[in-house]
Amino acid sequence: MPLLLASLGVLLLGGLVALAWPGHGRGSGRVAAGSVFAAAVLGIIPAIRVLAGGNVMTLDLPWEMPLGSLSIGLDGLSAFFIIPILLLGAIAALYGAAGLRDGGPRRTVATSWLMYNVLIAGMLLVVVARNGMLLLLAWELMSVASFFLVMFEDGRPEVRRAGRTYLIATHIGTAGLLVMFLLLGRGCDTLDFNAFRIGEGGPRLSGIIFLLAIVGFGTKAGFVPLHGWLPEAHPAAPSHVSAVMSGVMIKTGIYGLLRVLTFLGPPPPWFGWVLVGIGAVSGVYGVLFALAQHDLKRLLAYHSVENIGIIALGIGVGLLGRSHHLPVVAVLGFGGALLHVFNHALFKGLLFLAAGAVAHAAHTREIDSLGGLLRHMPVTGASFLVGAVAICGLPPLNGFVSEAMVYLAAFCAATSATGSFAVSGVVVITALALIGGLAAACFTKAFGIVFLGEPRSAAAADAGEVAPAMRVAMVILAAGCGVVGLCAPLLPGAAAEAIRVASGASPAEMQTSVTWVAGSLRLVVLGAGALLVTFLGMALARRRLLARRRVVSAPTWDCGYAAPTTRMQYTASSYAHPLTSLLGLSGWTRREITTPVGLFPKEAHLRTTTPDPVQDGIYAPVFAAIGRFLLRFRPLQGGMIQLYVLYIALTLLILLAWKLG
Amino acid sequence: MIVVAVVHVLLALLLAPLLPGVINRTKAALAGRRGQPLLQAYFDLGKLLRKDVVYSTTTTWVFRAGPSAALAALLVALAIVPFANARALLAFPGDLLLFAYLLGLARFSLVTAALDTGSSFEGMGASREVTFSALAEPALLLGLVAMAREAGSVSLSDVYTRLAPVSLVEGGGPVLLLVAAAFGVVYLAENARIPFDDPNTHLELTMIHEVLILDHSGPDLAFLQYGAALKLWLLGSLAVGILIPLHGAPPVPAMLGGLAGMFLLAVVTGVIESTMARLRLVRVPQLLVGATLLSLLALLMVLA
């Protein structure tokens, strides 16, 4: 516990020093990154200790706030979330320290680093808080810090718009949480977690609390239809910030949901169904809209919605397993969801960093203006490829492991259960199968169009590899994806403490389920090893075959057409078009066309954008209506000082009358 | 048991290129031609392995690694699929997922290699490949769920070793037939056969698989063609294992039965290719969704 507090202290201190550091922001970055590294080392040690031994640590201090004490604790669930937060936080800081230096005036860079440290500290505090009041404070700290980070380039109108959307969205979530904690604390005069007694409130109260948790934490996590801020805020933020926000910050929503579920006792089946529904919708919706995007970071942001969907599917099927007393399904579902939280932090962090490197080098995120970057940016390209294979859930990388666990949970439900529980398994499998196929389409597009082929613009042709520190950050994450994939059999055991807290399974049930799944994963790794060996064998065989042969270079076969230009290559939009039109997305795609006219046409132009239907179809009209309603009160604020004095006088008069009467 | 499994893998490695030969001879016979030799695929492979290679100046190591990676994935998948209803080399709960995702990995390698050429033709092929396989994935997985529930296990080997000749006439018979039909469609789609794709052309606006490998040459092309033959074998044995359930037969007759089934499937494929036209591209998704519905129907019957 002292190590954890020291970690928090180092983060805050480092942030302040970074703010005060002289120079042009470069030193600030180094100080901040150094402090996050130190904090990571300090914080990860106790987290690993808890996961290994299961000794829950708690600390209670009295404080001035009402409703309970300053209580923090470190159990398996908290420890499991601390590791990716600090790990990705440190690696992204390393990247940011190299990448953020030419970002703007010194003051902005230094402030941004303070906010970065506050964000990491806030996330840390969120997952260790054991008091509702403290959690809400940490939650706000995290949200506001990330808001300032998103607003780094506040000179650009789209960034301001994104920041505003994010601020509003996150506070809608916080409003839900506020009500939820008040309901949780009903009947006891404290918001300490260990004082919550929900069983007494009856199923109705726990249902309401569950729904509020879905709204409150789901807004942060990005459940559809509460995901609107993700595709706005992630592209607007600097890339190391997007990596942290998408890789770990949205997962605090998942943490919160899991934590609240532990208060609610044995869940009724509809809890599980709600999450399966949300997961299926978020997963398919996220990947579909990702497919339609051609801004690289926006595409990745939609993919976060998809991966949150996969996590929700895991939690949903796990809850159903719990309410139907099938501990294997519960353990596999929660285990898959938790491991996906960790894996997604690795590969989505990696992909955002690589996307940032591309934007940094080619000065655009527009996929259709890029191309051929692998030759100029070999490290970035190879890392992006690793991330792409991992996020598609393909073996032998880490994405396969967690997705396979969620799949297995669903398979167990579908094969051994009866009635609606079995149907839920089928729903989950259908959703995962669709998501898997579409994700492969989406990431062959993202990697193929950006990194392969010929450059589609001069900027892409001139792009060069990014700074060494940025490359190191990406390589570490890419290696992490491989190592975690090959250590798969150890994962369920390593996460066992977290899975036990989340799933409420007994130690004996944990033991059997974990052994069972670890046995399967051992053979998965055997298959992965065989895959690598076979691949090496093939590559060697190929090399020997080619050694005695002539290897000739020639242009790509162009079917006899002698003057192809690089703009004639397939683009991201044309690549995705069969799927998007098939799945009914073309109705949402807006086209601006200037068609060529006459025999010697001068210019032609086509521009497509796919806005978010939820954002444009629901939120925009609702917020416009609220705005119109509030406009009616505008005459009250006429700008005349006399009028304001009159208001004051009237208020006093009314108060006086009230007091007298 | 291990010996049988190893023999099955060796048989697949050895005989897979015979399947395209049988398909072609069937087509030739139905068209009244003599056709190419049965062993033509072997001759082609031998020749390609000894040829020089041409690489496009646009390409990178992704293009060069693609064929090897795809073939490696298919080879490992071969160790998971049970043949002639005997246990496979690699069998564990959840192996069907590894199988499905190894096929996905092979596809990923092939598609990225194709995109590496920067050719619009190969971009188009890649786009179609991912579109149709995204639709075939649910059909395959839901079919596997139905069979897993019928067998009460989530391992391909368990599922297939529980299929004996009586399984088709028992209560579960209709379920198995529905799944087999769905797998048959997936087999044709994933292997780019008619009615989805025409393996004989690669310079038309309707092609998928042949255009993906347009720029490969020499040993790389040999790897890809061998991989295509293996894929015929892999998905074919999933369908054949249901339709000709041989569990309980002694190893050698079972093996012969399985082989007969595979070549029968090749003949049927040849007949389909001779008697049907390729579907219009816009109709392809309907057929794949149809296959998914067959799987779903089978699943509803098992769940009920």
Image (tube, grey):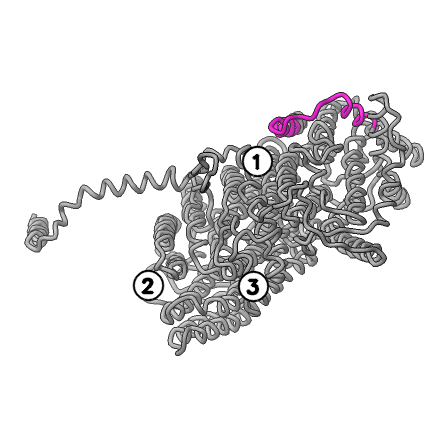
Identify the element where label 2 is drawn: loop
Quarter where residue A155 is shown = bottom left
Chain ID at mark 2: A
Q: What numbered label is drawn on residue A464? A: 3
Residue B62 inside the magenta-drawn segment? no
Residue A599: x and y in percent read 48, 35
Location of mark 1 (residue) = A578
**Magenta region: which residues?**
B267-293
Say which element carries label 1.
Answer: helix
Looking at the image, is A302 positioned above or below residue A88?
A: above
Q: Residue furthest bottom?
A: A22
**Parent chain of label 3:** A
Q: In the rendered view of the protein, which quadrant contains the C terminus of chain B?
A: top right
Image quadrant containing the N terminus of chain B: top right
| Marked residue nearer the N-terminal end (1 or 2) | 2
Residue with the mark numbered 2: A65
Circle nearer the N terminus (2, 3): 2
List x then y, in percent, for residue A508. Answer: 66, 52
